[in-house]
Amino acid sequence: MDKRDLFSVSEIARRSGFAASAIRFYEGQGLITATRSSGGQRRFERQMLRRLAFIKAARNVGLSLDEIAAALAALPDGRTPTRADWARLSRAWRARLDDQIAGLIALRDNLDSCIGCGCLSLKRCAISNPGDVAAGAGAGAVYLPKSLRRQAIGG
């Protein structure tokens, strides 16, 4: 392999747009791989840039790291995703994106009506919570559309 096809942590971070700490984290999670130089420094093959782009796109869709790992593991021989792979994997994400879009539209429309009325009165507010009745619906922002309520990290 040509040395020009191997990147240090700082170079792959610069090229991918991820922080070096994220690169090391993703390597630790098995999402990307590196070899070691004779001095023990990490060296990443050029193809890891495509895997990192895949990770970024999947995270932007809202996939968890476990879901991303499963998608990458489903590829033959753990190879980098091709255009056909991306199309096959992303088809499954379409419904998730549609739900997120619907949730954002509902959020936008509810914010417009709440802000637009000008009442500033909790007695008439559609999202007020008298008697803490929302507590019965679960933790978090229960009035936020479900598709926009992702599980918090560590919670």
Image (spheres, rainbow, N blue to C red):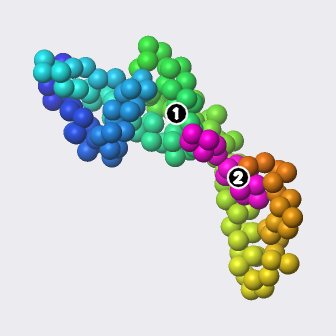
Q: Residue at x 82, y 57 (%)?
A: 134
| Image side of residue 9 versus residue 91, left or right | left
The picture places residue 21, in percent across and down from the top left corner, at 33, 39
Please state, as top left, top right, bottom left or bottom right, where the C terminus lies in the image.
Answer: top right
Q: Which label belongs to residue 77? A: none
Q: CA distance from mark 2 to mark 1?
A: 22 Å
Nearer mark to the viewer, of 2 and 1: 2
Q: N-terminal of the two: label 2 or label 1?
A: 1
Question: Residue 145 colored magenta?
Answer: yes
Which residue is tagged 1? Answer: 65
Please state, as top left, top right, bottom left or bottom right, where the N terminus lies in the image.
Answer: top left
**Majority SS type along the magenta span:** loop
SS for dot 1: helix
| Image side of residue 69 versus residue 116, left or right | left
Q: Can you say whether 129 is above or below 39 in the image?
A: below
Q: Which residue occupies the foreground of this view, 88 or 98?
A: 98
The magenta region covers: 141-155
| Image side of residue 145 versus residue 4, left or right | right
Which residue is tagged 2? Answer: 140
Question: Residue 39 colored magenta?
Answer: no
Q: Residue at x 60, y 45 (%)?
A: 152
Asked if the residues shown at circle 2 and circle 1 are in contact, with their CB atoms under 8 angstroms apart, the answer is no
Label 1 sits on what residue type? Leu
The picture places residue 126, in percent across and down from the top left corner, at 82, 71
Q: Which residue occupies the foreground of this view, 82 or 111?
A: 111
Q: Can you say whether 97 is above or below 37 in the image?
A: below
Q: Residue at x 29, y 40 (%)?
A: 20
Residue furthest to the top:
77
Which of the 4 image quadrants contains residue 121? bottom right
Other residues around mark 1 within 10 Å, as few (<14) / some (14–19) / many (≥20)? some
The picture places residue 24, in percent across and down from the top left corner, at 33, 32
Residue furthest to the front:
131
